[in-house]
Amino acid sequence: MGGIQNVNYQKALDATLAGLGGSAPTLLLHACCAPCGSYVLEYLSRYFRITVFYYNPNISPESEYEKRTAEVKRLIAELPVKYPVRFAEGRYDPGRFFALAKGHEGDPERGARCTLCYRMRLEETAAFARKNGFDWFATTLTLSPYKDARRLNEIGAALESEYGVKYLRSDFKKRGGYQRSIELSKIYRLYRQNYCGCVFSKRGSPRPLPDPAVPPGRNRPS
């Protein structure tokens, strides 16, 4: 995949938002969980008319998936926003994730399996955005200190070209975004899980939730 090296994605996002001119275009926002969605919705709902797209077939077991889905819906209902936020749910098909992960079961976190999972979820988001006429698509995944923002943005940029829907480049953990998500999680009593959702990340848990006071890279799993 063609790489974009050393990009300041927060500055890229600033430039995009400044260029909107108060028009409030539509945004399909892929959300992985309520805690990550909290800050991103608080931030972006000032600029976009957002539909949260919950597509995460990587999450197991189904009870965990349902719990996280319910928390996202509750957050949307309770979070004050400038423009109303809607919710759309993709198909829960864990078999698709397991087929994709075949041969990558032993990959480390942030390895090739994660890249395939990023691509699966973002491509489904891009396809849904095109089918339903959204102006932009994005993901909350860049908020997490455990996720590779550069890799996610490269995938999003490639899908923008492929699907013809603008991708919102981001690194939501910047400017205290991750810390704010923790604050909002406390305010709204959100369920904060300690693994991404798949069985492969769970086998290494419990891992500590990242401490926002510790510089990135200091407390990440290997």
Image (tube, grey):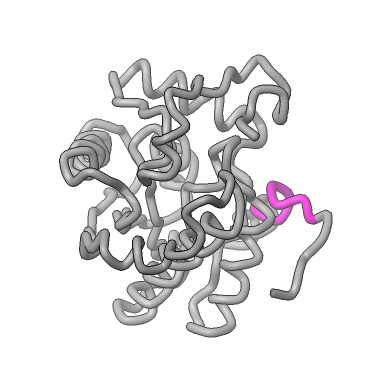
Name which residue lies at 44% across and 72% down: 123
Q: Position of residue 161 (x, y in %)?
A: 59, 82
Q: Quadrant of the N terminus?
A: bottom right
168 relative position to 122: left or right:
right
Q: Is residue 130 magenta?
A: no
From what the image shows, is residue 179 above or below residue 201?
Answer: above
Q: Position of residue 220 (x, y in %)?
A: 63, 29
Residue 37 quadrant: top left
Q: Nearer the viewer, residue 28 or 67?
A: 67
Q: Position of residue 183 (x, y in %)?
A: 45, 19
From what the image shows, is residue 207 above or below residue 160?
Answer: above
From what the image shows, is residue 107 above or below residue 167?
Answer: above
170 relative position to 188: left or right:
right
Q: Main secondary structure of the magenta part?
A: helix
Q: Nearer the viewer, residue 197 or 19?
A: 197
Name which residue lies at 39% across and 32% down: 35
State the residue lying farthest toward the right.
6
Q: Which stretch did the figure color magenta?
A: 7-13
Residue 21 visible in this rendered orientation of the protein: no
Name which residue lies at 37% across and 23% down: 185
